Amino acid sequence: MVTRATSHSTDGDTRRRVTRLLLEHGPATAVDLAQALGITATATRRHLDAMEAEGQVETRVVRTAGRGRPAKSYQLTAAARTNIGHTYDDLAMEALRWIRRFEGEDAVGGFAAEQVARLEARCRAALDAVDPDDPMARAQALATAMSGEGYAATASVIASGGQICQHHCPVAGVAAEFPQLCEAETRVISRLLGVHVQRLATIANGDGVCTTHVPGKTHGRKATGADGGSGPVPLPDPGRADR
């Protein structure tokens, strides 16, 4: 459940806040969004209807236990994600196509590894004080560090261990054509957590969230890399709303 905001906004401000909530926390119902925004569910649906008409959000039906009506949740469209901070996609795409054409697929993989090595170095510092034998604690610390890098990441515990969900991918448009970027990133997550993780879903592959499974301590083994999409993602408390 999300916290209630204490101030009202213009339509544009409210819709930007809706976008941020869906980006950071994944699909949500109108009721949950209304509680986060501090406005009525009816007013929230009005904003969502307008955003849906503009192609910014789309709906999906979520089956609930029992005989009640299925709940309808909202998520960002691919077009909405594309508009969020992907200024250099075209240039990066052309550069990687050039590398692939003249140097081959291995060179693309090498480029991807070099790029995520910088991310790994920055995130590793955030994990230095975390128990190396506690992959769940390290996953939480890594999610926080990755959020600082623009991935809007969260970590949660599930029956089989844990999972890291990245609700935004800064290179999703490029990674759709060059999955080496996702593969290199998954290997980085494995190395940082010290266990063999499995990528279950990726935004680049059309999923709503990049989801990585992290095995529990008793099931883990030293990381050697992974290949790589999504389970249901709860909507956690964002902590605060815009004022």
Image (cartoon, rainbow, N blue to C red):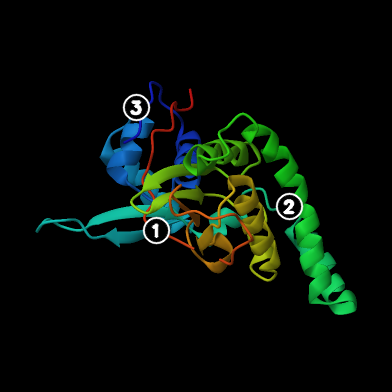
Within 10 Å of disc 2 (Cα), the crowding (few <14, some 14-19, many 20+) is: some
Within 10 Å of disc 3 (Cα), the crowding (few <14, some 14-19, many 20+) is: some
Disc marking residue 4: 3
Answer with mark 3 or mark 2, whichever residue precedes in sequence: 3
Q: Residue furthest right?
A: 102
Is 31 on the left or on the right of 227, as rendered?
A: left
Mark 1 or 3, which is nearer the eye?
A: 1
Q: Disc 2 residue type? A: Val
Badge 2 marks a residue whose secondary structure is: helix
Query: Compared to 176, does 46 lie above or below?
Result: above
Is 229 on the left or on the right of 174, as rendered?
A: left
- Disc 3 from disc 2: Cα separation: 37 Å
Return the x and y of residue 162 as percentages of the image width and height: 43, 48
Residue plotted at (56% across, 50% down): 168
User: Which of the pair 213/97 is nearer the observer?
Assistant: 213
Q: Disc 1 residue type? A: Gly
